[in-house]
Image: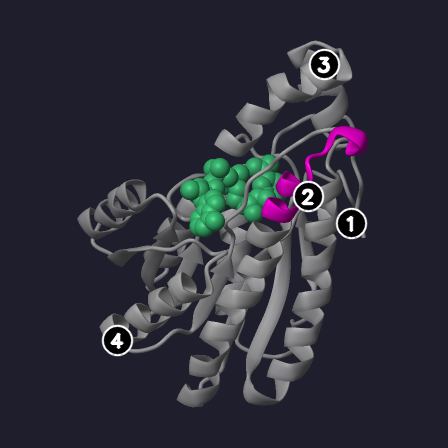
Amino acid sequence: MALQGKVALVTGAASGIGEQTAKKLAADGAAVVIADLNLANAQKVADSIVDAGGKAIAVSMDVTSEDAVNAGIEETVAKLGGIDVLVSNAGVQIVAPIEEYAYADWKKMLAIHLDGAFLTTKAAIKHMYASGKGGSIIYMGSVHSHEASKLKSAYVTAKHGLLGLARVVAKEGGPRGVRANVVCPGFVRTPLVEKQIPEQAKALGISEEDVVKNVMLKETVDGEFTTVADVANTVAFLAGFESNALTGQSVVVSHGWFMQ
Ligand code: NAD
C-alpha cells in the first residue's frame, strides 16, 4: 500500500491504459479520480474500484478545456482534500500521410496531448506546492516520444513535446518536491490501437496481420505487445517514488522496441 493516504487523478481513465493505471493506484492505497470525456464509462470504472474496496470518484473532464480542467481539479481537492499524483494520460490517435493530414486534426491532436498536459499540470501543481508535500506528475508518452513512424506527424510531435514539458516541470518543481516523468509504452492492445490496425493496413496497402507483425511489433525483442498492466505498474512505481533522484526522466516500457 505504497500510496496509502495519497490522492491521484488520472485523465483518460475510462478506458485502456488509464483505466488499468487508476485501478493499480487504487490497489496501492490511493484515492483515485477517474477523469474522462466519457463520464458514463468513468463512473463504471470508479464503481468497480469502490466495489473492490478502494476509494474512487468520477469527474467529467475534457482536458482541452481550461475551465473543465480547473473545475475537475477543484472538485478533487474539495472532495478528497488535495492532489498528490497527476497522471496526464488522455489521448487519441489520428493517422494520415502529412500531405493529407487535416489541419483541424493536427490542432485536435496537439490540444488533447499537449494542451491537456499543460492545463492539468498548471491546475494541479499549485495544490502540490500549497500542501507543502510536493507530488508526482506522470505524463503518458510513447515510444513515439523517441522514435518516428510514418503517418503519425501530430502524434510523434506531441509525444516528443511531453519530454520537454516534463523536464521543465522537473526543474521548476524540484525545489518544492514535485517530480515529473514520462512513461513511454510500446504498442498496447487498447481501443486506440485496435482502431489503427485496419487504418494503417489501408494507408500502407498491407494486410492487418502485417501491420501487427511488421509495423507495430517488428522492432521488439520478442514480437509481443506491451500490456496495460506493464504500463500501470510503471506509473505506480513512479507515483510512489518519494525522492527527486528520479525526475525529468522517460521510462520506456516496450519489449525492447526502443532502448535508451
Ligand atoms: P484508449 O482509447 O483506450 O483510452 C483513451 C481515453 O482517453 C478514453 O477513455 C477517452 O474517452 C479519453 N479521452 C480522449 N480525449 C479526451 C479528452 N479530450 N479529455 C479527456 N479524456 C479524453 O487509449 P489508450 O491506448 O489507453 O491510450 C492512453 C494513452 O496512452 C494515450 O495518451 C496514448 O497516446 C498513450 N499510448 C498508448 C499506446 C497504445 O499502444 N495503446 C502506446 C503508447 C502510448
The earlier-in-sequence mark between 3 and 4 is 4
Q: Secondary structure at mark 4?
A: helix
Mark 2 → mark 1, Cα distance in angstroms: 12 Å
Cβ of disc 2 within 8 Å of ligand 1?
yes
The mark closer to the camera, 3 or 4, is 4
Mark 3 → mark 1, Cα distance in angstroms: 23 Å
Image quadrant of residue 5?
A: bottom left
Question: Which amino acid is tagged 4?
Answer: Ala
The earlier-in-sequence mark between 3 and 1 is 1
Who is closer to the viewer here, 169 or 107? 107
Residue plotted at (67% across, 31% down): 95
> Which residue corresponds to mark 4?
78
> Which residue corresponds to mark 3?
210
Label ID, residue 146: 1
Q: Secondary structure at mark 1?
A: loop
> Which residue corresponds to mark 2?
155
Magenta stretch in the rendered image: 97-109
Q: Position of residue 220 (x, y in %)?
A: 74, 32
The earlier-in-sequence mark between 2 and 4 is 4
The mark closer to the camera, 1 or 4, is 4
Residue 83 position (above or below residue 254):
below
Residue lying farthest to the front in this orientation: 103
Mark 2 → mark 3, Cα distance in angstroms: 22 Å
Cβ of disc 3 within 8 Å of ligand 1?
no
Q: Can the viewer see residue 217 in this picture? A: no
Question: Which amino acid is tagged 1?
Answer: His
Q: Secondary structure at mark 3?
A: helix
Residue plotted at (59% across, 46% down): 108
**Label 2–label 1 contact, CB within 8 A:** no
